[in-house]
């Protein structure tokens, strides 16, 4: 994300922009306690109980409604940034694997469009200068690009070939009791692992943690060589809270995105709609 999308380090680089702040946050922020990751050379063990729990979580998120698209509108802020740190944000996603996030602030408009619907995953993004950039496919999350709408992520991971789940157990995370499940692709577990945390009573997700491969936006084939201390992988975390019913579907109205333990963007949703036939245009 740039300001709108603080994921990965493929950020627009306007001088003094929020993108520069997020690039530094992505590469230099101190680590906090990480989600349990798979040791090199090992595979998790799929468990039927975990698959059943994922289905319970999906049922809790959809309320039995078949969701084709979602649109969230609200405000977004980047804490402790000295420049323009707030703006209006619109997040759109389709069940078929497309998403668009558009943020408008005093510095201009940032847009990110992801397409996982066919072929290799792709992401195009542009900042206030209108220049279009591309994120390498290997630096994108593995399952579904709608990080702001967990129902699509769980649905895609539950139905896609090759994905499996394992229950880690009950634990305390961010001060609350949760059930921890891991979802991964059996052919590439280390690049696809998503750690999901659910409220034990409601089975609504409270948290999702995953890792992506960092890269240098000026030279995507040479990951972050411009910053020698940058990590090869970046841990990203999304926290969901303040669920409210929208057409019978629980939707998180407070979404926080963390990069390596630092809060990168805080989104407060003001309105949400589902199944309106929302479409996403290409950003070419």
Image (cartoon, rainbow, N blue to C red):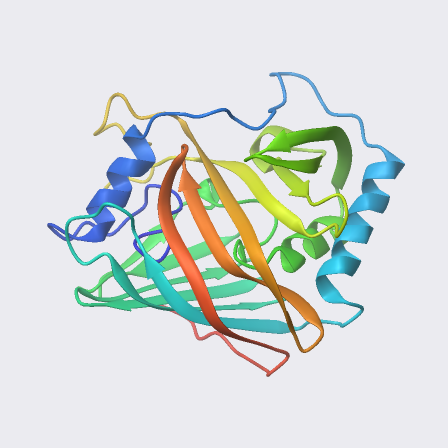
In the displayed orientation, state which residue is furthest to the right. Answer: 48
- In front here: 32 or 102? 32
Residue 65, position in %: x, y? 76, 72
Q: Residue at x 65, y 16 (%)?
A: 41
Q: Is residue 20 left or right of residue 70?
A: left
Q: Residue at x 12, y 50 (%)?
A: 16
Count of numbered circles on the image: 0
- In front here: 38 or 97? 38
Residue 102, position in %: x, y? 36, 67
266 versus 168 height, above or below: below
Screen quadrant of the C terminus: bottom left
In the displayed orientation, state which residue is furthest to the bottom. Answer: 276
70 versus 183 height, above or below: below
118 versus 78 height, above or below: below
From this viewpoint, is residue 217 visible?
Answer: no
Q: Residue at x 71, y 74 (%)?
A: 248
Q: Residue at x 57, y 28 (%)?
A: 35
233 versus 258 height, above or below: above
From this viewpoint, is residue 127 visible?
Answer: yes
Q: Is residue 139 left or right of residue 208?
A: left
Residue 250, position in %: x, y? 66, 65
Residue 1, position in %: x, y? 36, 51
Q: Is residue 105 left or right of residue 193?
A: left
Name which quarter of the figure residue 45 lies in. top right
Name which quarter of the figure residue 194 lies in. top right
- In front here: 221 or 67? 67
């Amino acid at each position: 994300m740039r300001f709108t999308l603080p994921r990965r380090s493929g950020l627009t680089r306007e001088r003094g922009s929020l993108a520069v702040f997020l690039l530094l946050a992505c590469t230099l922020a101190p680590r906090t306690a990480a989600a349990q990751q798979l040791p090199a050379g090992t595979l998790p063990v799929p468990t039927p109980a975990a698959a059943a729990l994922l289905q319970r979580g999906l049922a809790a998120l959809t309320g039995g409604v078949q969701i084709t698209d979602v649109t969230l509108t609200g405000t977004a802020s980047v804490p402790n940034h000295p420049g323009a740190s707030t703006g209006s944000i619109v997040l759109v996603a389709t069940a078929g694997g497309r998403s668009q996030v558009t943020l408008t602030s005093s510095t201009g408009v940032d847009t990110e469009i992801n397409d996982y619907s066919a072929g290799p995953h792709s992401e195009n993004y542009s900042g206030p200068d209108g220049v279009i950039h591309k994120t390498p496919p290997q630096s994108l999350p593995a399952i579904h690009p709608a990080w702001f709408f967990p129902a699509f992520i769980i649905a895609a991971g539950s139905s896609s070939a090759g994905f499996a789940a394992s229950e880690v157990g009950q634990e305390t995370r961010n001060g609350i009791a949760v059930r921890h499940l891991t979802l991964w692709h059996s052919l590439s577990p280390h690049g696809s692992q998503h750690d999901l945390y659910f409220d034990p009573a409601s089975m609504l997700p409270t948290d999702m943690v995953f890792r992506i491969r960092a890269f240098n936006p000026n030279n995507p084939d040479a990951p972050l060589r411009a910053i020698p201390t940058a990590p090869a992988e970046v841990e990203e975390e999304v926290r969901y809270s303040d669920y409210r019913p929208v057409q019978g579907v629980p939707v998180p109205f407070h979404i926080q995105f963390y990069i390596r333990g630092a809060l990168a963007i805080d989104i407060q949703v003001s309105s949400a709609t589902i199944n309106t036939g929302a479409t996403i245009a290409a950003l070419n």
